Amino acid sequence: MAGSLSQYWKKRNFGATPEPRGEVVPAHGRLSFVIQKHAASRLHYDFRLELDGTLVSWAVPKGPSLDPHVRRMAVHVEDHPLSYANFEGVIPKGHYGAGTVEVWDRGTWVPVEEPRAGLKRGRLKFELHGEKLHGRWMLVRINSSKDQRQEPWLLIKEHDEYERPAAEYDITAEMPESVLSPPGKVTKAATRKATAKKAGAKKAAAKKPAKKARARTDAKAPVALPPQAAPAKLPLSLFPQLATLADGPPADESGWIYEVKFDGYRTLARLEGEDVRLFTRNGNNWTNKLKMLHDDLAALKVESAWIDGEIVVMNDKGLPDFQQLQNAFDSARTRDIVYFAFDLPYFGGYDLRRVPLVERRALLKALLAGVSSPRIRFSDAFDGPAAPLLENACRQGLEGLIGKRANAPYTTSRSTAWIKLKCSRRQEFVVVGFTDPKGSRVGFGSLLLAVNDKAGKLQYAGNVGTGFDTRRLEELYGQLKALEQARSPLATVPPGVKGHWVKPRLIAEVAFTEWTGDGRIRHPVFHGLRTDKDVEAIVREEARHVEAADGAEDKPAAGSRVASARSRGEVARAANVEVTHPDRVIDAASGATKLDLVKYYEKVAPQILPHLEGRPIALVRAPLGIGKQLFFQKHVEKVKIPGIRQLPRSFWPGHPAMIEIASAETLVAAAQVNVVELHTWNSTTDDIAHPDRVIFDLDPGEGIGWDTLKEAATLTKKMLDLLGLESFLKTSGGKGLHVVVPLTPRAEWDYDAVRDFSEKVTQHMARTIPKLFVAKSGPRNRVGRIFIDYLRNGTGATTVAAFSARARPGLGVSVTLRWNELAALERADQWNIFTVFERLAKLRADPWKHYWKTEQALDDAHQRLLEAMRE
């Protein structure tokens, strides 16, 4: 059954668009997939799976989410040719899909079931093996109406080790760049080309008569480029650096500057010759909405640049007014919009993100010096102290200040190098409903508001009924009525909260004085609707205390060992392994450096290696440090680690070769390439198909206290005692506890059988003590209860090894315990990479001394379990 490209060809003029025409090609090897980030009139992600010689395609407006509870709309569109998988470029204005296209992710996909039948019935399950996306996914058709021009589907992440809560992590925001041409990636060829160009220029200059030196004023480089500037292709998209809400200025304000916090929309401008495009912080293309600003920026005639700034409308007092900005779009008076530019991440063929902030701003100021348009302005900065500056800003009616470390690089993520200091509390809320008006008021009485909790569920946050004029009431009421639904979108409706419920699509910006104890906002005032943020990203903002040392990895203290080592480019050594960037801070919470982690694994090798040897392993890498993007690695193709053992493919047919760490030197080499966590299988290479342990992972739900979790561990032990099984205890190093049952591998107890046994134990405990235990996974099911994660016992599943560090703030460690130590245990991350050796020094014997000698099987235990379940 061959795919068809007739619709694809019909919609395009290949004489004008750079897109490939392509052909239907026969199947070849593994099936490929590609996800392309497409900044058309609205940013979306094109999800494409190879099948029958073409790429079956869906347009996903918000892109993929790693949270299984988030269901992303995916509109089925025409098939594309396989050659489209490598396409990056700009589709010209006036043509179908006009806008920039880049390859956001790519790799191979494996259908879990027959894919053609799955597409036909509207339920396609598959695994992704990409550079960014991994694990199990599902596409589900939600409307099979044959007369519908484009079928709506849902793209859903399934539960596995790669899932992440939406409130904790957004992969499209954290990893926004192309996998083909990521920003700042300088190839050897590009470097050679740049070097040759400079050398040629020097030779040409030598042949000319000497002239009086003068400052460069051309658009490519208004001032000399700093040494940190790297030659780079201008990326098609750019995610901006975001500021962290702070509870006050840093204790030490030396090296900080402050700018006005503008009350507007974050806007990034991409300039490449005459091609000027304007994007929101989420990548939506607003070029057509900002025609005058587009023309003003085009007049700069810049060879290439990304400019970061904010658009505002000034009121009659000369202050930014968010409501007037919204009115400017509503009334098409965009000529009143002013663009305050404050950063320059890319310029003139160079990546400036590693250039210190003050030097990037100097370049930007020089670039804008000759601008005559009043719509483009440079955002001035002020030296501290912040307190009087903030007081003055608040007195004038401004929203607050943005503090920035002067020597910090530009990071495409949220960072404590930029902080928000607000005059009053103000943030975004999801609109979940409205109340009826009273008296002579038109439209509605108030908006019902919510925020996402850590599980991605909407929790009620109060209501707002002030800040509206009559026109806004009427306009909003029309939007609300169009979204009205019978069911509440809240996880739980608090007593006394009534109104008309709406689909959670609108985001309101609201100022308020404080949060109450029950999670409501006090004295709220409506400021406007936001269209530049996603509903899933709206959470309760918590102010952080920012120390002067936060982000110190970017600017070491003068005269320190760290500063001197970096300035000389030194490396360290551990277990005969060369450690690069040894002084780079990887965990701001503890101040731990990369060398600290490497030294930890060198020292703890005697304790951890018995838990690693002979077992397939999965690695968790944190190249940018704790709190940044993490990468799972089960095979050798991503990052090469000296000394790592590649296991025969026959151990897991149909999958790439697994890996094993069996020496201290390899362990240290893994830490050198930023491996933080080590997870292992439940079987060894001596008998890979038959587990030698069962793991019960006690996963506490929301609302479960530490004492309750310890009680649950005790009850689990008692249950296993009744079944005649000896069990052992360890902390997870994160939030939970692990109860481990060693086994003697037996032919009749393969992975499926062991997993089935552990599931029955979980189900029996959930039926016996339903107020404490639950047998279903997922945050919604385990609120106030504990899920005993039996899924850790399936083929290919892994669990963090004893004495592995955890990629969490503080670098906690999974530690083995005696059962009689449980009562005094204070938390699951009680020990970290610095303190665990104090515990080891005090131990008279290994708490798991008998673990290695325990021989037991599940036959008798299974019979006792079946009898207990029948009672």
Image: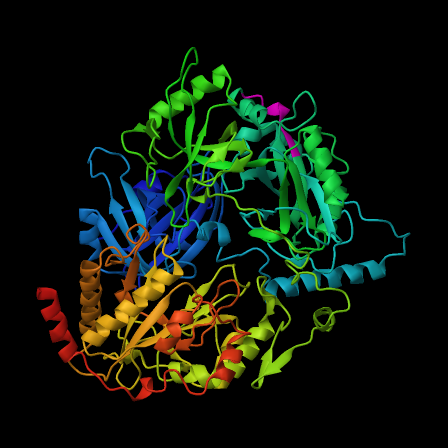
Quadrant in the picture for residue 721: bottom left
Q: Residue at x 51, y 71 (%)?
A: 832
- The x, y position of residue 602, in whole percent, is 53, 82
Q: Magenta segment: does it hold 216?
A: no
Q: Is residue 612 visible?
A: yes
543 w.r.t. 335: above or below: below
Specify start and end residues of the magenta stretch as a single range: 332-339
Judged from this view, the residue extending furthest toward the top is: 440
Quarter placement of the C terminus: bottom left
Image x and y of residue 338, in percent: 65, 30
The one nearer the camera, 198 or 150, is 150
Q: Is residue 807 left or right of residue 136?
A: right
Compared with residue 31, is residue 457 higher up or lower down, i.e. above or below? Answer: above
Using residue 808 as the reference point, say whether residue 493 is left or right of it. Answer: left
Q: Residue at x 58, y 50 (%)?
A: 544
Along the viewing direction, whichever of 673 and 374 lies nearer the viewer: 673
Q: Nearer the viewer, residue 354 or 54?
A: 354
